[in-house]
Amino acid sequence: MKIQAFILDLDGVLTNTSEYHFQAWQRIAEEEHIPFGRQENERLRGVSRRRSLEILLGDALPRYSEAQLQAMMDRKNAVYQKMLEQITPDDFLPGASELLDGLRARGLKIAIGSASKNTRLVLDRLGILDAFDGIADGNSVAHSKPAPDIFLHAAALLDTPPASCVVVEDAESGITAALAAKMFAVGIGPQARVGKAHLRYDSTAQLDLEDVLTTFERL
Ligand code: G6P
Ligand code: MG
């Protein structure tokens, strides 16, 4: 099998929107008097908006009506979208733009595989809405990460067998999803978070494309 395509997560891999997600959830947690810090936030990384709220509320979840849950998700999203207004084409994480260039130069297909319903908005702010051969986002599938569906959908958009796809992910749920999709998983972040990936780098800037390609071919 040869690598034909890369499926890239967005938040925390190409741009630092994972920090904005955290700050927006923190705002909601404060309003609801629920303790919520960076440690708790680790469990929200990569998971859908609804699942994030369920995790954030924890044992308090049954105390809220569906209408209240919906209102909290809407509030979080409004805060988050306000933050997105700051994003410009200068807001790539270090190495992200070079990664896209390197993939293109090697003739590989590129898709986005993100749980976010704001994916297109963020890509547009970054000026790269047209840079992908496929976009699989929070509107594409019913079951989000850790289910493999989003990555399988991305592979189908690219017309590429899953075994020829590489996923780049910063979330534990995303690595689980990639492995469940039988794809080669590249983790971005600490061992404790993405250590189950086939390969791991501390940051997008550290990702070595040649290293990924040769490691994949050796498997
Ligand atoms: C990404 C982020 C998560 C976020 C999810 C849903 O996976 O990593 O932190 O909760 O998308 O984002 P959305 O923009 O739809 O609320
Ligand atoms: Mg992410």
Image (tube, rainbow, N blue to C red):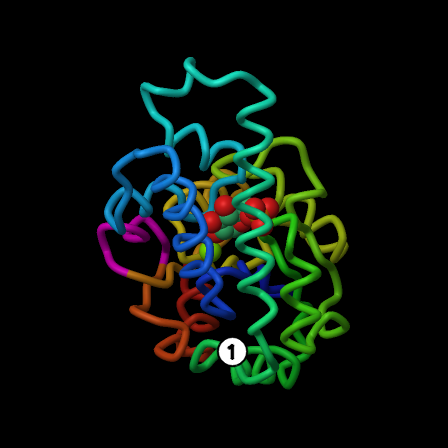
- At 45% from the left edge and 33% from the top edge, which residue is drawn? 53
Q: Position of residue 60 (x, y in %)?
A: 35, 20
- At 44% from the left edge and 58% from the top edge, which residue is drawn? 18
Q: Position of residue 31 (x, y in %)?
A: 39, 39
Mark 1: give few (<14), some (14-19) or many (20+) Cα within 10 Å. some
- In terms of image quadrants, where is residue 36? top left
Q: Is residue 38 left or right of residue 83?
A: left
Q: Position of residue 59 (x, y in %)?
A: 32, 19
Badge 1 element: loop
- At 29% from the left edge and 50% from the top edge, which residue is drawn? 193
Q: Nearer the viewer, residue 55 or 198?
A: 55
Q: Residue at label 1?
A: 92
Type of residue at label 1?
Answer: Phe
User: Relative to 13, does residue 89 appear above or below in the rendering?
Assistant: below
Question: Which stretch is magenta?
Answer: 190-198
Point out the image quarter for the N terminus. Answer: bottom right
